[in-house]
Image: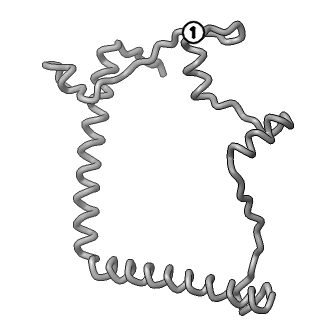
Amino acid sequence: MTEKTLTLQEQVVAVARLRNTERSLALAIGLAREAWEDRNRVEIDNYNAVLAAKNLAEEALRARAVEEYNLTGKKKPAPGIEIKVFTRLSYEPPAALAWAIDHKLALQLNKASFDKIAKDNPMDFVALTQEARALIATDLAKALGEVKF
């Protein structure tokens, strides 16, 4: 099977058609979804109410289980409940950065900041190249004017 190479204009028209079809389908799906939600409003509302209640109950259960652990030290305070103990670090970022600089550890390049500086201040080890990128108009129908698609 031989492939036909499309001209640039034909490619623009093809993308415009696909975008048009996409919009139509998205609209149809949106309308169908709204109709489905209307027909199933009671079940959806019930589900959302149960979901909210379940989340609150789980939060309360977790808090109560941690209280029990703090009182008894039991890591399995009830069937289906297990306590995991995690180490949390708290520190002042400037102090941590000073330590990291002193020890030449845990440092990472802030690429965004470096890129801004390197664009304005040429450096021997940084290569600046130009890269072309194609931007496609959001409204291809307007850009195409009289062309049918």
Amino acid found under the numbered disc labelled 1: Thr
Residue 12, x across and y down, in percent: 31, 21
**Residue 53, quarter of the rendered image:** bottom left
Residue 126, x across and y down, in percent: 67, 12
**132 or 95: nearer the viewer:** 95
Q: Is residue 130 left or right of residue 127?
A: left
Q: Is residue 24 left or right of residue 88?
A: left
Residue 6, x across and y down, in percent: 37, 16
* Residue found farthest to the right: 103
**Residue sitting at x 34%, y 14%:** 8
Q: Is residue 65 left or right of residue 133?
A: right
Colouring used for the render:
one colour
> Label 1, on which residue?
129
**Residue sitting at x 52%, y 86%:** 57
**Residue 143, quarter of the rendered image:** top left
**58 or 9: nearer the viewer:** 58
| Quadrant showing the C terminus | top left
Please count the marks in the image.
Answer: 1
**21 or 38: nearer the viewer:** 38
Q: Secondary structure at mark 1?
A: loop
**Residue sitting at x 25%, y 36%:** 20
Q: Residues within 10 Å of mark 1 (few under 14, many from 20)?
A: few
Q: Is residue 79 above or below residue 131?
A: below
**Residue 19, quarter of the rendered image:** top left
* Residue found farthest to the left: 146
